Image (cartoon, rainbow, N blue to C red):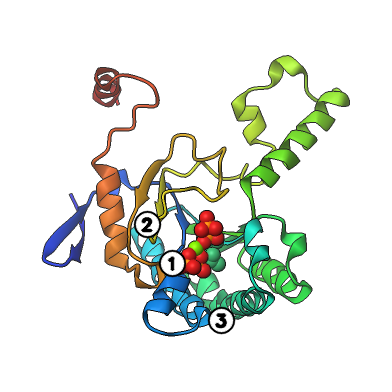
Amino acid sequence: MMRIEGKMGCTKVRIDPAKLPQHIAIIMDGNGRWARRKFLTRIKGHEKGIDAVRNIVEACREMGIAYLTLYAFSVENWRRPASEVNALMRLLKNYLLKERDNLIKNEIRLQAIGDLDRLPVEVKETLFQVIEETKKGDKMTLILALSYGARWEIIKAALRMAHDLNTGIIQEKEVTPDLFSGYLTTSPYPDPDLLIRTSGELRLSNFLLWQLAYTELYITPTLWPDFTKDELFKAIEDYQKRERRFGMTSDQISGLHAKS
Ligand code: IPE
Ligand code: IPE
Ligand code: MG
């Protein structure tokens, strides 16, 4: 069987291409600390973080990951100093303009989730333009979570479902977790199989609270600008060693594998 091999120091990393996660979600954290350690401004940390984004998108595309969701800006991040928010918006727009040709060439479809109306108009326009230009990409879907908050998303979904209940489009007895998932902004995508958070924080920070119910978590102390392709391979290797039981017993899971 073909294996993807990377290196972590002297240790070889082995990935089984037959057991890749279909959807990886990443909380890209630690740009500020990375900059502080180097006596640089936080903005320099965010700039360096974009290089890591490029590498990781490229690695996922090369490996054949179908969906990659990147938490780029939370709804709570609007509370940061205006100078930092403005710099992040400028970097986001530049990233989109710089990457569009690459995304088209590599047949990567760009999507976005979050309260996009809060984005500055020129960022929103660029975003929608690149989403449109890349819509035929069928090798990978790159989903940017921008001005995203899971609680906000769940409330919006609940309101839409309540509307459909009130108007008789759906009946109460039809309401299931699957049906509710269909009202979320993530409805076109499967739930993430693997969540990576860099910089060691042990929290979800309002990211995909509903969708992460059965996702495998991988937290690394590495700061986002230092997160390399090999670090990603290591996370996937770790994921592949786990047994996803979804509430069943280990014997049941082995039985299922034996049948398939
Ligand atoms: C993540 O890095 C980037 C965004 C949240 C936009 P941070 O800016 O949160 O970095 P730290 O947590 O201060 O190190
Ligand atoms: C989460 O990181 C949001 C993004 C990575 C975009 P934060 O750095 O904002 O998270 P908290 O505030 O420390 O939980
Ligand atoms: Mg942070």
Spatial CA span between label 2 and label 3 = 30 Å
| Residue 190 in the image, given as x and y percentages of width and height | 52, 42
- Ranked by sequence position, the earlier of labels 2 and 1 is 1
Q: Which label is found at residue 63?
A: none
Q: Amino acid at mark 3?
A: Lys
**Tag 1 residue:** 30
Q: Are marks 2 and 1 in contact (CB under 8 Å)?
A: yes
Look at 15% across and 67% down and name the residue there: 9
Q: Amino acid at mark 1?
A: Gly
Image quarter where the C terminus lies is: top left
- Ranked by sequence position, the earlier of labels 2 and 3 is 3
Q: Amino acid at mark 2?
A: Gly
**Viewer-proximal residue, 61 or 55?**
55
In the displayed structure, would residue 236 be above or below residue 160?
below
**Viewer-proximal residue, 193 or 18?**
193
Look at 47% across and 72% down and name the residue there: 32
In the displayed structure, would residue 4 be above or below residue 18?
below
Q: Which label is found at residue 200?
A: 2
**Tag 3 residue:** 98
- Tell me: is circle 3 under 8 Å from ligand 1: no
- Tell me: is circle 1 under 8 Å from ligand 1: yes
Look at 30% across and 44% down and name the residue there: 19
- Residue 71 shows up from this direction: no
| Residue 129 in the image, given as x and y percentages of width and height | 70, 71
